[in-house]
Image (cartoon, rainbow, N blue to C red):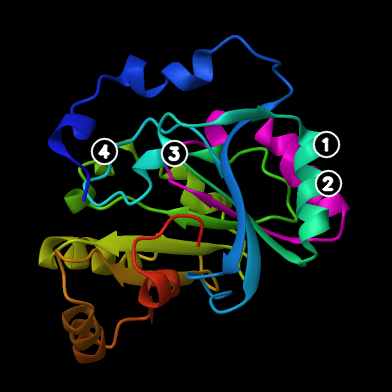
Amino acid sequence: MLSKDARAEPTDERLAPLKRKRDPAALLINEVFTSIQGESSFAGLPCTFVRTTGCHLRCAYCDTAHAFHEGTERTIGSLLDEVSARGLPLVEVTGGEPLLQPSVHALLRGLCDAGRTVLLETSGAVSTAGVDERVHVILDVKTPGSGEAARNHHDNLARLVPGRDEVKLVLCDEVDYRFARALIDARRVPPGVAVLLSAAQPLLSPAMLAEWMVRDRVDARFQLQLHKVLWGERRGV
């Protein structure tokens, strides 16, 4: 869970790392690592992760606060070389919020050009316009319990491509569950776009969420964070 101090951080301080004077074609990167993909319909597959630095949101359940300010400037070429050296076909660009750095689009294109299956996990609070059409967008729609639901760019939902993109909602309580149900029932998500629901622990029991979904015959997929089941809160996994 995110500390109260972190959640109270002013917006200008949240974005300060991205305002450092640096090569505009480079990216500020928090970490690159290889692990098991823990979420989405790609869960269980070995995957290389490229985590960018910086996020303008402070979700109550955030588990990657280390990406708020820590980072090293990297060229697109060096990142493409490192992903290639790791030898996996699946790569996810995550954050932080990757789309806060315009040069991330060059990285996404380069990864696709190299023949990788590319996932982009984005908060939903930045426009996805301009993302390479080959990229699998995983749109993390923010719920009321996150404290950031007002930041959602709802136009992003209309850009989701059936059979390629996915919507993810992290639920803190029954209010969030009803929020997710309303999104699904109102057909805000295009048909053929998978909806994945997960419980923000310890705020909501995964078993409780699963029971609600079965009871209500929800047209969505339940998911656990497999990397946490395996390794807990360790970084780099």
Residue placed at 36% from the left, 24% from the top? Answer: 14
Marks 3 and 4 sit apart, C-alpha to C-alpha, by 22 Å
Marks 2 and 1 sit apart, C-alpha to C-alpha, by 6 Å
- Look at the image and tell me whether residue 125 can be seen: no
The residue singled out by tag 3 in the image is: 67
Marks 1 and 4 sit apart, C-alpha to C-alpha, by 36 Å
Percent coordinates x, y for residue 78 in the rendering: 79, 38
Dot 1: within a 10 Å radius of its alpha carbon, few (fewer than 14), some, or many (20 or more) residues?
few
Going from N to C along the chain, the mark reached first, 3 or 1, is 3
Going from N to C along the chain, the mark reached first, 3 or 4, is 3
Q: Quadrant of residue 23?
A: top right
Going from N to C along the chain, the mark reached first, 2 or 4, is 2
Going from N to C along the chain, the mark reached first, 2 or 3, is 3
Dot 2: within a 10 Å radius of its alpha carbon, few (fewer than 14), some, or many (20 or more) residues?
few
User: Could you tell me the amino acid type at mark 3?
Assistant: Ala
- Nearer to us of marks 1 and 4 is 1
Going from N to C along the chain, the mark reached first, 1 or 4, is 1
Percent coordinates x, y for residue 18 in the rendering: 51, 20
The residue singled out by tag 2 in the image is: 81
The residue singled out by tag 1 in the image is: 77
Specify the segment rendered in magenta.
99-127
Asked whether, in this view, residue 86 is left or right of residue 223, the answer is right
